[in-house]
Image: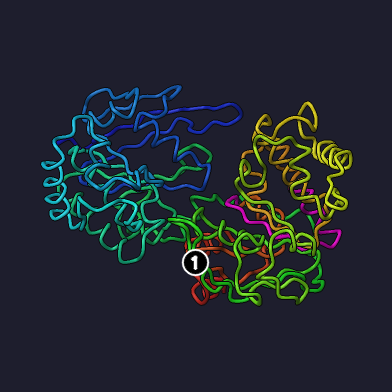
Amino acid sequence: MSEVLLAIRGLTKAYPGVVANSEVSFDIRPASVHALLGENGAGKSTLVKTIYGLVRPDAGAMVLAGQAYAPPEPRAARAAGVAMVFQHFSLFDALNVAENIALGMENPPALGVLAQRITEVSREYGLPLDPRRTVGDLSAGERQRVEIIRCLLQSPRLLIMDEPTSVLTPQEVEILFRTLRQLRDEGLAILYISHKLEEIRALCEEATILRGGRVVATCDPRSTSARQMAEMMVGGTLKTPTRAASVGGEVVLEVQGLTAAPTRLHGQALRDVTFSVSRGEVLGIGGVAGNGQDELLLALSGEMRVAPGMVRLRSDPIGSLRPSERRARGLLCAPEERNGHAAASDMTLTENALLTGRVREGLARRGFVDWSAARGFAERIIASFDVRTPGPQATARSLSGGNLQKFVIGREILQRPDVLVVNQPTWGVDASAAASIRQALLDLASKGAAVVVVSQDLDELMEISDRFAALNEGRLSPARPAHGLTVEEIGLLLGGAHGMEVAHHAH
């Protein structure tokens, strides 16, 4: 058996305005678990999609088991022995396990034969699964087993796992790790993507670290600390905030012991989240996607009701108020999902301005919409935030992602909120637009608003936050002054090392 299963040489892939991968080279060996590390946007997804035949590189080459390898589509990758389990499962809830697995195979055997194979493989690899069960009734961990068994039935040589534990319980993680070690011992190569550094230390023998689309380091996770890996991922270059820390004004928003079940399948429960934000302050909340950011936003916006006392606005309990009642009192939110959540795709910008601005901008009188006032409000947003559009009559759908983002954020800022909560404020916008959105958030705070910014972009949070807290598996670390936070402390907070451990490292 050759020492290298997959050799990756000089892979480069550029999209308009961003180089996703730049001359990426590394080797994956048989019978090993190889970690791929990097922050969001470091280029991990593009790289694995290239290996799996979903993306064609602009330059570079791959060699699989001594043969040139350039899969034009995933089917070719699977035929060559490359399998992938995605972070978001592609399963049909109404069908049973065997039917779902058959759909993912090129030439599935008869269902009875397949069911027997599924039972055999699930026993052999310690992945308990009944082929007759309806997928809609399965837990996240069981759904993942369906995807893994589907892969194993193809007898792969390389298995790619993308964030495989982000939706699993600790018990399910144990089962998964046992299986992956067994597969490795049988000679399979596993490429493992995860943000959970302690997990990588426990499972992987090699790690390749990407930053800004380039390979910046390789290490052996077994002998490298989580702190060292976090530093390699982030690089020692976090920009410092561009304004002086604000003096504490009165507390405007107070969240106490916020606990809530997830609102959707695979969601993250919130567990005892506590924080407060004062006038003139920006609180940055960091964390890897899927750790409760969406649920936190829904609980603050009023789309998800919680016990009244868990959320207080100027000391008044508002946990049971609807979104429109919270807006009237000055708590405004801009969610991450622009199309369909922050904006209605097929409505015009005037109508979208009306959707959240009706109360605070007085856009309706005695039950009738004042359309000229609504249009005027939309025009103000377009002018103030440099939204590139033919005009307020354009639909939200017709705007580019970055321009719709500017519109959505501008719409909330111009309503002079007392508290603004925003998730991923500059996601998908170019550097200059991102800078102007961040400046607008800082200006809003300097006028006395309390601002909560939830983001996966650490540079962004360090640039604008007065205090920083990390969300990990639905728990929020205590907020700490952002100024002077080191890269290693941030890495540890993001990885879920809460409380004492981080305090201890800080000394």
Q: Which residues are magenta?
A: 438-457
Horizontal side of 138 relative to 236 (left or right) equals left
Q: Position of residue 318 (x, y in %)?
A: 70, 71
Q: Residues within 10 Å of mark 1 (few under 14, many from 20)?
A: some
Q: Does residue 100 lie above or below 197 as drawn?
A: above
Mark 1, residue position: 261
Number of numbered discs overlaid on the protein picture: 1
Q: Is residue 441 magenta?
A: yes
Q: Does residue 68 lie above or below 500 as drawn?
A: above
Q: Position of residue 235 (x, y in %)?
A: 54, 49
Q: Quadrant of the N terminus?
A: top left
Judge by depth and name the residue closer to the eye, 310 or 475.
Answer: 310
Horizontal side of 404 relative to 458 (left or right) equals right
Q: Position of residue 208 (x, y in %)?
A: 39, 44
Judge by depth and name the residue closer to the eye, 57 or 212.
Answer: 57
Identified at 58% across, 76% down, the residue is 257
Report helix, strand or loop for mark 1. loop
Which quadrant of the structure image shows residue 345? top right
Judge by depth and name the residue closer to the eye, 185 or 351.
Answer: 351
Q: Is residue 154 magenta?
A: no
Which quadrant of the structure image shows residue 86? top left
Q: Quadrant of the C terminus?
A: bottom right
Q: Does residue 303 lie above or below 385 as drawn?
A: below
Horizontal side of 180 relative to 371 (left or right) equals left
Identified at 77% across, 43% down, the residue is 353
Q: Which amino acid, by three-letter code, is at mark 1?
A: Ala
